Image (cartoon, rainbow, N blue to C red):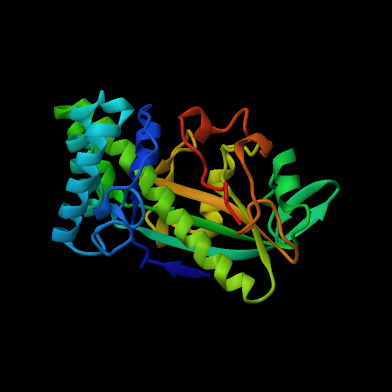
Amino acid sequence: MRNYDDINVKIDIKEVLSYLGLAVQEGPDPAAVRDDGSGADGFGILTAASGDEDFKNAAAAVSSWLKENADGGRNENIADQLMKAAGLILENARPRSFYTVSDIKKSDGNIYLGNSSIKIPGLDAGKLLGECSSCIIMAATLGGQVDRLIRRYQVSDMGMAVILNSCAAAGIESVCNELKQRLESEYEARGLYLTMRYSPGYGDMPLSLQADLCRLLQTEKRLGISVTPGMALLPSKSVTAIIGISDRPQLGSRGYSLSCDSCRAAASCLKRRSGGKCGYEQKS
């Protein structure tokens, strides 16, 4: 078991735009948005890690670029709103994460976590964990302050609330991806490989599994994450997930490609339905 509370939130502006249904033309990156420590990390990935003034400079450069390129320049007004929203999410996010490792028991075609009675149902779970003898159970959150921020804007400015929600969605994805990257480095050093990160609600993995994973991780005590009767997580920008551990490369392992077209969950994927991706199309 281990906490990771030192992960910086990053907001990928292209991912936010996809959530909002806006297209970005491909083209040269603005110089200030390159990975040069100027408050951004790669194209349009904003982070407050370099300091407030650096973030403002990078955000101004991204905003200027978006005014010319976002949706063919037809959405000039959204650029400054988007930068404001990204800054507010980075300011209010309190990212926390926790994971534990569990053995996998396979019996009568079913998969169970360790010696518990927690069953992971579905064909997707069988494929994900078919070559794994153990798995990582993880949870991450941006904290309740982000929810309170979005609720305030839902009362006064619904348009900004929508943009804030999209920025927060990109932010929690960045925390989950960073956690998985750290875990991959640790396990690869031991000659082991990780599968893609798979959450309740993906494919045929039932959303009801949220409650079991939260109980196992004691998320309310450790991270302040609770589960509603409808199986939603609170704070809303929170995630639970399972990652398989194997002694051979898996789909979703670093350097092994997994695209939407080759994913079993593509037809019912909540991420894809909202215009995004789960983040596991990787390049070797």
- Left or right: 33 with respect to 199? left
Q: Depth check: 261 or 5 in front?
A: 261
Outermost residue toward the top? 74
Location of residue 167 with respect to 180 vertically, above or below: above
Outermost residue toward the front? 28
Location of residue 85 with respect to 275 vertically, above or below: below
Residue 227: name its quadrant.
top left
Q: Depth check: 238 or 218 in front?
A: 238
Location of residue 203 with respect to 173 vertically, above or below: above
State the image coordinates of residue 88 (x, y, percent, origin top left).
20, 47
Q: Is residue 154 visible?
A: no
Which residue shows up at 16% across the image and 28% down it?
A: 157
Q: Depth check: 95 or 246 in front?
A: 246
Which residue shows up at 57% across the image and 65% down it?
A: 184
Which residue shows up at 57% across the image and 73% down it?
A: 186
For the C terminus, the image quarter is bottom right
State the image coordinates of residue 121 (x, y, percent, origin top left).
71, 42
Which residue shows up at 51% across the image and 28% down it?
A: 273
Tally the marks: 0
Q: Depth check: 223 or 27 in front?
A: 27
Outermost residue toward the right? 108
- Left or right: 17 with respect to 150? right
Q: Is residue 118 visible?
A: yes
State the image coordinates of residue 107 (x, y, percent, origin top left).
83, 52
State the image coordinates of residue 282 (x, y, percent, origin top left).
57, 51
Outermost residue toward the bottom? 190
